[in-house]
Image: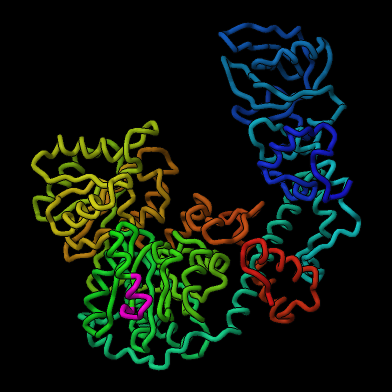
Amino acid sequence: MKLQDHVRFVRGIGPKKAELLEKLGIITLEDAIQCYPRGYEDRTQITPIRRLTDGEKQCVHAIVGMLPKTAHIRRGMDVTRCTVYDESGALTLRFFNNKYAAATLEVGKEYAFYGKVQVEGGGFVMLSPDFEPVGADNRTGRILPVYPLTAGLHQRDLYRVTDAALAAVPDDLPDFLPESVRNRQGFAPIRDVLFEIHRPQDMRQAQQARRRMVFEEFFLLSCGMRFLRARRSGKQGAQLRDLSLHALYRALPFSLTGAQMRAIEACTLDIAAGRPLSRLIQGDVGSGKTMVAAALCYLAAKNGRQAAIMAPTELLAQQHIQTLKPLLEKLGVSCGLLVGSMGAKQKRDIVQAMESGDISVVIGTHAILSDTVRFHDLAVAVVDEQHRFGVNQRAMLTAKGENVHLLVMSATPIPRTLALLIYGDLDVSVIDELPPGRQRIRTYAVGEGMRPRIDAFIDRQCAEGGQVYVVCPLVGDGESGRTSAERTAERLTGVLPHRRIALVHGRTKAAEREQIMADFAAGRIDILVSTTVIEVGVNVPNAALMVVEDGDCFGLSQLHQLRGRVGRGKRQSYCVFYGADRGADARERLKTLVHTNDGFVIAQKDLEMRGAGDFFGTRQHGLPPMKLADLAGDMDVLEQARCAADELLTCDPELIHEPVLRARIEKLFAQYGEGSLN
C-alpha cells in the first residue's frame, strides 16, 4: 500500500469504520501517520501485587486461582469477578459486562494484567484489565500508544491503520526540516521518528520523537509567519503625507502616557516609511489603547481619507463612538456608527455617507464587513479586541480599501513568545502604563462562608453612592453547582430589597440590554447582575465593586478583564472572586489575581495552569491546528524553533537551498487562505 491510499483498504476497516476515522481527519494512510498518539501506557514495568498503588494504572503477572464468576447486578449490568495471585499476594479482578473474561481465563495459567488499581477493604482490585498470557507481549509487555478516538472506534482500529501507514512509509520520505537544523537539534531523520513516535521501544524514545514533531510544528509556523512579514514589507502602504498630531494633543483634556506616545510614534514611523502599517497594540483594560486608534483615525481624515474601527460587540462600538465622536468632531472629523441592530433606513443613510465620503470615521461591528458596505477611500482599519475576530475578518476589512494600514488592539495580554507565534505577521507594541490617577484595585478571593459579609459590603458600597457589578458564569440554571445570573438577581433582590437591581445577559434583547447598560452608566441602577457580556462594555467610573461568582471556572485572563471594569473613577475600587474554597488549584489560581494587577504575569500563569485555550484559538487566528504541541508545556521548544527559523531565513530568505521546506510552507499558505508566497 501507499501513503495516498484510502484507509478503507486496510484489513479490518470497513466502510463504517472508515466514516468514523474521517471524523478524526483520517482519510488516507498519510493522515493516519500524522495522527499522533496523545499519550502512552508503559506496560513494560511489572509490579508485585503487594506494591500496587491506589489510583494508578499498573501491570502485574499473576496466576488465575479460581474460575471467574459472573453476577447480574441490575438490568443491563453484569459484573465478573476473579482472584489472581503472585508470590506477594492476591488481587481481585472486576470486569463489567464482559463475559469474555470468564470464557478465556484458565485456572492455573499465568497472565499479564494491566488496568487501574483501587484499594477496597484492605485489598487491591483491578478494574476491567487488559490481559494476555505471559510471554505473548502483544499488548502488555510494551509501550502502548494511546490515540484520540470517537464513539464507535477502538484503539485496535487505530493500531490497524497506523500499522498499515508505517508499512507504507517509503525509505526516501522527504524531510522538510533542513539537515543543518536536524543536526543542531540532535534529531533523527523523519522516517525513523515516525516509527519511534507510533511504536516506541521505551518512554525515552517516545519523548524524543514527540519533541522532534513539536519542534517541526513550531518551526513551520515560525517560517510561515516570517514569510508573511517579508511579503508585507515589499508592499506600499496608503500614503498619508501630513502626520502632525499637535492639534489632536491640544484637544485632549489630559496628557497621554509615555507608553501611549511610544505606540503612536511607532505607528507613524511605519506609515512614514511608506510600508503598510500592520501593528498589534497590547495593553491592559483601561491603559488607553483607544487613544492610539484615535490618532490614526485623525491622520486618515486629515489627509482626506477614511478610517474604520471594528469592535466585537455593539456595546463596545457604542462606547467607542461616545468616546471618540466628541473629540474628533471638535477637530472637524465626521464620525458615524454602523451596527446590526440599527433600522434599515439608518443603515442605508450611514452606508451612503461612507460611500460618498461624507463620513470620515466609521465605528461598528461585523456589520462593516457586509458586501453592501463600501468606503469612498479607506486608508486605516482598526480591529479592537483582536482575539474575538479571525484573520479572515481582518482581511475582509482591509480589502475594502487599497494598501490599508491595519492596527489591531487587544486587552488580553499574551506572553511574548506566544505573541510572536500568534501575531508573527504583526509588529507588536505594548502599553504598559496606566493613565495617572488609576488606583490599584483591592482584590480578594473568598469562599462561600464569606457570603453574608460580601452581601453587607455590596450594600455598604451602594449606601456610599457607588455601584456594583455581580458576574455569573451562567444565564439560567443548567450545569450542576454553578451560579446563574437569574438566580443571583432573584437572591439579591430578596437580600437587598431596598437596592435597584437589574439583570443583563446574552439572551437579553439588544435594545433592552443597551437601555439597561445606559441606566447603569447614568446611575439609575445600583447593582448590575450579568454574565460576561459586560467583559467588554461601557465605561462606568462610579462602579467601584466587582463580584464574580464561581471565579474558579473562568480563565485568569478573563477574570483580569472583568476586574478592569472597575477602578475607572476616583473611588477606591474592589474585586471579590468566589471559588477559593474549591480545592488547592482554584485557590492557587485566584491567589495570582490577589497578588498582582500585571496582565502579563497573569497571562503567563494562566498559560501554565490552563494551557493556551484562552490565547490560541487556531480557528480565530487562522493558524493551522496543533497536532501535538502544547503551548503551555512546550514554550521552550517554541522558542528554540522560532530562533532556528529566524536564523535559517536570515541566511536564505527565499529558501532557495531548501525547496522541500518552501513547498511545505506554500502548501500551508494555500491551506489556510494566505495564497502564494510569491
Query: Would you say residue 572 is visible in this rendering?
Result: yes
Q: Is residue 638 above or below residue 288?
A: above
Instruction: Name the quadrant of the N terminus.
Output: top right
Q: In which quarter of the view is residue 443 placed? A: bottom left
The residue at 59%/61% (across/down) is 623
The residue at 46%/61% (across/down) is 389
Instruction: Answer left or right for 460 relative to 117.
Output: left
Per the picture, the main secondary structure of the magenta-coloured stretch is: helix
Q: Position of residue 253 (x, y in %)?
A: 20, 80
Q: Position of residue 135 (x, y in %)?
A: 87, 27
Q: Is residue 503 above or below residue 594?
A: above
Q: 365 or 114: nearer the eye?
A: 365
Q: Position of residue 321 (x, y in %)?
A: 27, 69
Q: 183 or 28: nearer the eye?
A: 28
The residue at 40%/63% (across/down) is 385
Q: Which residues are magenta?
A: 351-360
Instruction: Answer left or right for 52 relative to 73.
Output: right
Task: Say if the magenta span includes residue 352.
Answer: yes
Q: How many marks?
A: 0
Task: Say if the magenta span includes residue 344.
Answer: no
